[in-house]
Amino acid sequence: MAGFIHAAISACLEIDALVNKESDILFTLHDRGFGGDISNGIDLHAEAICYKHLSPFGSVFSEESGWMSPESTITIMLDPIDGSDNFVSKFPYYGISIARVVGGKTTEALVCNLANGDIFVRTAKEYFRTTLKNSAHKDEIITNLYAKIGLFEKAIEHPELIKKLMLHKLKFRSPGALALSLAYAPYVKYVLFLGTMRPYDIQAGLYLSEHLHVFQDDRYILISADKEIFEQIRMIVEKEYF
């Protein structure tokens, strides 16, 4: 396993051990972070752990602190806890998003769902799913042809679009952790997100799912393994919503 991915998994394991302790310090509110959200204790502790493990591999740019080391041609895009509100609410859908960008191109990425131990990894040579319990084992990621639902992040902010999707019987859930939802794209009918595109939220997830049908601009992201569904939702968003 590549050195960077090994370091990223080591960071995930250390954060998982911290999360399982459920210490009060993880739920304490702090100042507003670089990304604009109020940081919880878990965000900051996870960020420190990730920096320790990942900083030898590039300049770390994190949602909580922004640039944590001088800029360089190699950037580590980091969301130390994606879905931290889910964590503090004890809703099991939160994790870590890490991407290594070399010369403007993503070369390695990892998204870990701390709630169930799933880890998704892509490098130039590999794309696989593993777990925190046994990261040496690699499972092939196979598109789920039986998916019944999509994932529509930030859906509540777009009530008119919800109506249009429901009219076309395009069911969805909105679990509240964008990086995780992008990583799970092969298993659901589609992933849709409308809103501000922040690199630490999307860099890893987009790279993980780049083999699927993908559209991204400054307005929205749409991913689906099914070309017909992909084109149907694009038409709805482009012609009926915007």
Image (cartoon, rainbow, N blue to C red):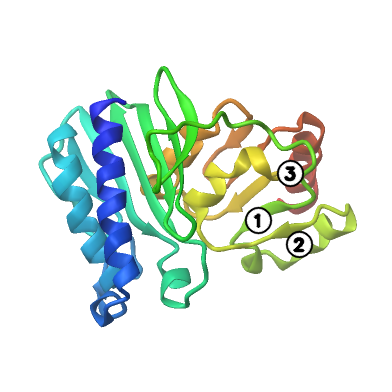
Viewer-side residue, 88 vs 142: 142
Q: Name the element at disc 2.
A: helix
- Left or right: 149 with respect to 17? right
**Amino acid type indicated by mark 2:** Ile
**Amino acid type indicated by mark 1:** Phe
Image quarter of residue 124: top left
- Left or right: 132 with respect to 70? right
Q: Are marks 2 and 1 in contact (CB under 8 Å)?
A: yes
The crowd level at tag 2 (other Cα within 10 Å; few <14, some 14-19, many 20+) is: some
Q: Judge whether 25 appears above or below 35 on screen.
A: below
Q: Residue at x 46, y 61 (%)?
A: 115
Q: Residue at x 47, y 78 (%)?
A: 89
Q: Judge whether 149 appears above or below 208 on screen.
A: below
Residue linked to disc 1 = 152
Residue linked to disc 2 = 162
Q: Residue at x 58, y 32 (%)?
A: 141
